[in-house]
Image (cartoon, rainbow, N blue to C red):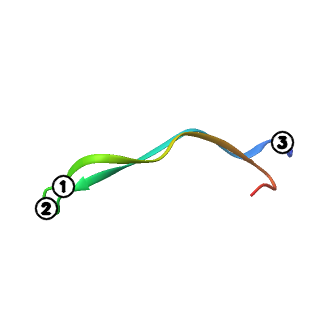
Amino acid sequence: MSDTTPVLKVENLTKHFPVRRGVVIQRTIGKVQAVDDVSFEIKRGET
């Protein structure tokens, strides 16, 4: 593996968490967008 080859490559990462209301009967009332369409690479030696 050369130094320019990424050890981790992520493309178009999206993560949303549901927002729920209720204890017994839960219903989803919205969402929280943690990340939306994020891409990155990590190469050997990078932190």
**Disc 2 residue crowd, few under 14, some 14–19, many 20+, Cα 10 Å:** few
Q: Secondary structure at mark 2?
A: loop
x and y percentages locating residue 6 in the rendered image: 75, 44
Q: Is residue 18 left or right of residue 34?
A: left
Assign a secondary structure to mark 1: loop
The Cα–Cα distance between marks 1 and 2, rounded to whole angstroms, is 6 Å
Q: Which residue is mark 2?
A: 24
- Residue at the image position 83 percent from the left and 45 percent from the top: 1
Specify whether 3 is left or right of 42.
right
Circle 2/circle 3 CB separation < 8 Å: no
Q: Which residue is mark 1?
A: 26
| Callout 3 amino acid | Thr
Mark 3 is surrounded, within 10 Å at the Cα level, by few (under 14), some (14 to 19) or many (20 or more) other residues, namely few
Q: Which residue lies most toward the left here?
A: 24
Residue bearing the label numbered 3: 4
Q: In the rendered image, which quarter contains the C terminus?
A: bottom right
Disc 1 + disc 2, Cβ < 8 Å: yes
Could you tell me how far apart the alpha carbons at marks 1 and 3 are, in whole angstroms?
A: 48 Å
